[in-house]
Amino acid sequence: MTDRVNDTAVPAAHTSPVTPFQRLGSEAGVRALVDRFYDLMDLEPEFAGLRALHPPTLEGSRDKLAWFLTGWLGGPNLYVERFGHPRLRARHMPYSIGIAERDQWITCMGLAMAEIGEAGGFTAEMQDKLLTSFAGTADWMRNR
Ligand code: HEM
């Protein structure tokens, strides 16, 4: 069962008693995922191309992705409250995103989820569902 949120399939929130946001540890859980994602992007040579598209300091990127994912996972709409409709595809237009960039993003996010693992709510099933949704969104962001 999935919903369409921001043009992306995400695990249904309103039909289940507990949202993915809650399962993943709410604000702290989402922040841990985003921090691991950007730490890996910063550290791992395989993500150098993706890293180079981002600003020198990742603090703003961390905040924005954490706010966005909070709402996307069924928590409070922190991103929308601050910036309005995500318009993700339009907001990514300034960055040249092809297959390599898309795949680096998906791999980096997959690694972050796998590293945090079951203890942080990322069961194999949760990782699978989220990775499928992330992959769809990432592919939609391609602009070349
Ligand atoms: C397909 C590969 C992707 C690339 C190369 C990419 C790259 C970027 C870059 C360079 C920024 C600007 C960061 C900054 O201003 O600090 C950004 C912003 C952002 N990205 Fe991505 N991104 C990708 C996929 C995604 C996906 C799949 C999501 C969501 C699931 C996402 C969510 C966001 C959000 C919410 C922002 C902040 C937008 C704003 O308010 O300006 N991105 N991305």
Image: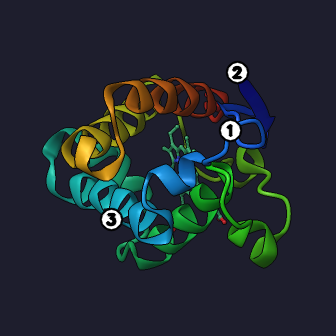
- Give the residue at x 55% y 46%: 20
Choose mark 3 or mark 1, whichever is in front. 1
For badge 1, the amino acid type reads Ser
Residue 75 in the image: above or below residue 58:
above
The structure's colour scheme is rainbow
Residue at the location (36% across, 41% down)? 109
Residue 79 visible, this orientation: yes
Residue to which mark 3 is pinned:
35
Q: Which of 20 and 68 is in front in this view?
A: 20
Mark 2 and mark 3 lie on one chain; the one further toward the N terminus is: 2
**Disc 2 designates what residue?**
1
Respond yes or no on whether mark 3 lies under 8 Å from ligand 1.
Answer: no
> How far apart are labels 3 and 1 at the CA level?
27 Å
- Quadrant placement of the C terminus: top right
Q: Where is residue 135 in the image (x, y as percent from the top left)?
A: 52, 27
Q: Is residue 127 above or below residue 6?
A: above
Residue at the image position 27 percent from the left and 53 percent from the top: 41
Q: What element carries label 2?
A: loop
Could you tell me how far apart the alpha carbons at marks 2 and 3 are, in whole angstroms? 29 Å
| Mark 1, residue position | 16
Specify the amino acid type for callout 2.
Answer: Met
Task: State the residue in front, 116 or 38.
Answer: 116
Q: Mark 2 or 1 closer to N-term?
A: 2
